[in-house]
Image: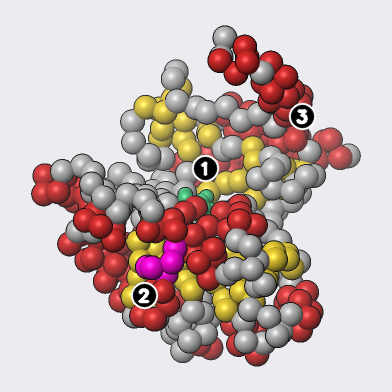
Amino acid sequence: MLATDATNPAFMQRLRHRLEQHDRQGLVRNKLLREGPCQPVQRFADDDLISFCSNDYLGLANHPSVIAALQEGASRYGVGSGGSHLVTGHCAAHHALEQALAEHTGRERALLFSTGYMANVGVINALMGQGGVVLQDALNHASLLDGGWLSRARSIRYRHNDMSSLQDLLVQHQHEHCLVVSDGVFSMDGDVAPLPELTALASRYGAGLMVDDAHGFACLGATGRGVIELFPEHGGIVLSQALPVLVGTFGKALGTAGAFVAGDAALIAYLEQFTRSYVFTTAMPPALALATLASLQVSQTESWRRQRLQALITRFRQATSAMALPVLDSHSAVQAVVLGDIDETLAASAVMRDHGLQVSAIRPPTVPRGEARLRITLSAAHSDEQFDLLIRALGAIDEQYRARRA
Ligand code: PMP
């Protein structure tokens, strides 16, 4: 029995009740125990499954050069950084990675964080305070929403990618300290934020703009600069004058872990002093910074990985356009089949498993109620055979979908 059971049974009872309710609604998520590396064929307890739900979009999590850099970093620096950045934890490896990220994103400086969650929560808190207004896209990632709620600013959500909904709010709050916040690529829908309109609106109404490109960084754009490279009207990349606060993460296309924020030197000097999730935490292991630097370099030189990913995305769109399944309009690595009903989504995930594929059923609260879905993620590492099997499994799900609605 837990100590709390003895001292306060009612307290534990309330927690149990909440968990049981969650279970009854089909919302409990169970962890799978994976053996071995993150690669298309993944080993679970008694099954080898082909994963279409990892965020390793370029296949770099298990790349020999990235592994070698991690090993080299461990020999050079040991394992832990031993301190926060502002005390003694900041090493030459961190510095080199920050410089490479600044150069890659066309910004003056970049600042490292141990996770994207910490970057988003910390940066919004540092930029905003009492009296401010955070305007969030309704489908922003939980870490951005939490950042807004944890700051003492007022958080308001505008309709997803709806610029007139955002404009109404900007007009209403134009004399306040406003920050517009958006995902670059939306993590559960896969669509892209309309950066030209976002930057124009933020500048017209004197608001700050922060974009979290966790799912676009290293994947999108000819050279992997992400969503900032997608709009040629900005002459190559959207610079910090238009988009002052750019966040990217390492746990997805770069296959490591951690995050960065990039911007003007003045912004980064400010964040370095006032971002609590930067100041009051241990710096990421320097070996990991070295591995991430190696991964960034591979992502730059092996552009065939982005091309391969794009080719698979195009083939996926073509194959599913002939199906009745409700596949959202996305040209990123994230492809969502929104079945809506939780049980139907769990059943579809089971069909995938019967085909030897791992595709998770994404349910509330990760997505809004009534929008449960299969979230399929494509990777440059998937072979043609693996991809064809995915399309066959989707075909079987499509048949059931049609039959249920006939
Ligand atoms: N932003 C977005 C859009 C994400 O999807 C995620 C992770 N799922 C994060 C931030 C958090 O990044 P990290 O995993 O590095 O904490």
Residue corresponding to mark 2: 269
Secondary element at tag 3: loop
- The amino acid marked with disc number 2 is Ala
Which class describes the residues within 10 Å of circle 1: few (<14), some (14-19), or many (20+)? Answer: many
* Percent position of residue 25, x then y: 77, 29
Residue corresponding to mark 3: 25
Q: Which mark is residue 53?
A: 1
| Front residue of 151 and 233 | 151
Q: Is residue 218 above or below residue 53?
A: below
Q: Is residue 170 above or below residue 38?
A: below
Residue at image location 48% in from the left, 74% down from the top = 245
| Front residue of 133 and 94 | 133
Residue extent of the magenta highlight: 271-275
Earlier residue among tags 1 and 3: 3
Residue 162 within the magenta-colored segment of the rendering: no
- The amino acid marked with disc number 1 is Cys
* Percent position of residue 103, x then y: 30, 76
Q: Residue furthest left?
A: 76
Secondary element at tag 2: helix
**In 3D space, how far apart are the residues under numbered discs 2 and 1 (Cα atoms)?**
37 Å
- The amino acid marked with disc number 3 is Gln
Q: Which mark is residue 26?
A: none
Residue at image location 48% in from the left, 38% down from the top = 51
